[in-house]
Amino acid sequence: MNDQANSVEERFETTVPATLSQWSRHDTTWMLGLFGTAIGAGTLFLPINAGLGGFWPLMILAVLAFPMTFYAHRGLTRFVLSGRDGADITEVVEEHFGLKAGVLITLLYFFAIFPILLIYSVALTNTVGSFLEHQLHIQPPPRAVLSLVLILGLLAVVRCGEQAIVKAMSLMVYPFIVALLFLAVFLIPHWNGGILTTASTPPEPSALLHTLWLAIPVMVFSFNHSPIISAFAVDQKRRYGANAEERSSQILSRAHVLMVVMVLFFVFSCVLTLSPAQLAEAKAQNLSILSYLANHFSNPTIAFAAPLIAFVAISKSFLGHYIGASEGLKGLIVKSGRRPAPKTLDRLTAAFMLVVCWIVATLNPSILGMIETLGGPIIAAILFLMPMYAIRKVPAMARYRGQASNVFVVLVGLVAITALVYSLMA
């Protein structure tokens, strides 16, 4: 009888939602996991892309960074939370908009995220190969072998489950934060005004608006972590039940404050060190800010640390984007009418990801940047516009109507999409 009572009590404890009384280690892990997905290799190019427009556009972007990031990702989180228990983003779309819309969004979701995973596979192989050759002076193994070993290593983390992925990412965040801080502080003695030379002459309003229009997508996608939002929302709903929206917003806000403060400190430290002409030179050479700084200072410490930081950044982002890409692929398989057992579905997904990522990383094609750009408008539509449309149309999200932040998110989404389309056509 006691054993039966204990069993009932244990089941009761696992089904009762956690309370909001105190911040837990679980919340910290997710906060760092969100940070880890967003802040990756793109951060190492942000000082160049954001700084080229001059001082005033950069200041406006700095002010807009937190609301752009927070309100958009909160909207997508609320959208996933509005579905039935345990439903991911692909299932929630089908629940709210019907089967055809569910299939279409799932397809777009997958093809927006999966190419980024391929890009990270290529970048990881290039980074490690270059590090072995130039810093350790070791002849790297054949590209096919190196890429296979690296991707298998990351998929070994994936096979441990979603919580293991998030924990691994949160652990990898710590050295990345330390590295960003180290570099930003290291540059302080070398501050020479840099971008401040453009502050004395305010730009023409039309030129300022044009610069902001083209720069906003850069800022948006430097902080983008939409691929992990669905898994994040599902886990919060499972853990906090009716309180999931409130706790999710708290975790998101803290993650975004950490992102914005860390990244903007790094960006401003870089642009106060380098002149606009030097930033333009780095862009022309297609170098990350780390590589350019290493060459600029001829500093062996930066030259050695740069590939290690890039390795951590790319690995974190790979794991976070894998969650979204696998979610999309599983949704496509299920919506095709096939319903394999969960373990079989996981193995099929992992095998597909391994083979395609390995082939692309081995071939090292040059068209991946274009693929990422093509996926940009889709990600912006899913992140900014779809949740706001759902707020207007879906009864389960009616309580979020009438908020000024909704208008702001729609405007930023439209700006990002139109600027990306313009960049493709230009």
Image (cartoon, rainbow, N blue to C red):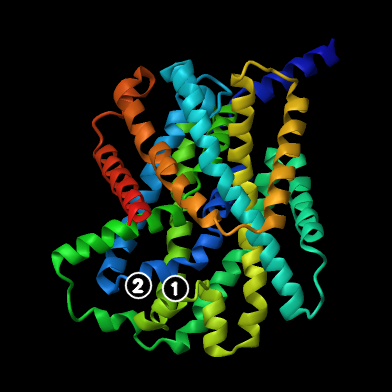
In the rendered image, is residue 21 in sight? no
Residue at 18% from the left image edge and 72% from the top image edge: 203
Residue position marked by numbered label 2 in the rendering: 52
Camera-side residue: 391 or 57?
A: 57
Measuring from the top left, give residue 55's x and y in whole percent.
28, 74
Q: Amino acid at mark 2?
A: Leu
Residue at 45% from the left image edge and 24% from the top image edge: 82
Q: Residue furthest top?
A: 1
User: Could you tell me how far apart the alpha carbons at marks 2 and 1 are, in whole angstroms?
Assistant: 9 Å
Residue at 56% from the left image edge and 49% from the top image edge: 116
Secondary structure at numbered mark 2: loop
Q: Amino acid at mark 1?
A: Lys
Residue at 15% from the left image edge and 63% from the top image edge: 206
- Can you tell which mark lies on residue 283? 1
**Quarter-wise, where is residue 172 in the image?**
bottom right
Q: Is residue 331 left or right of residue 52?
A: right
In the rendered image, is residue 397 in sight? yes
In this rendering, the label closer to the viewer, 2 or 1: 1
Q: Badge 1: few (under 14), some or many (20 or more) residues near its Cα, within 10 Å?
A: some
In this rendering, the answer to whether 205 lies above or below 19 is below
> Are the two marked residues, 2 and 1, in contact with CB atoms closer than 8 angstroms?
yes
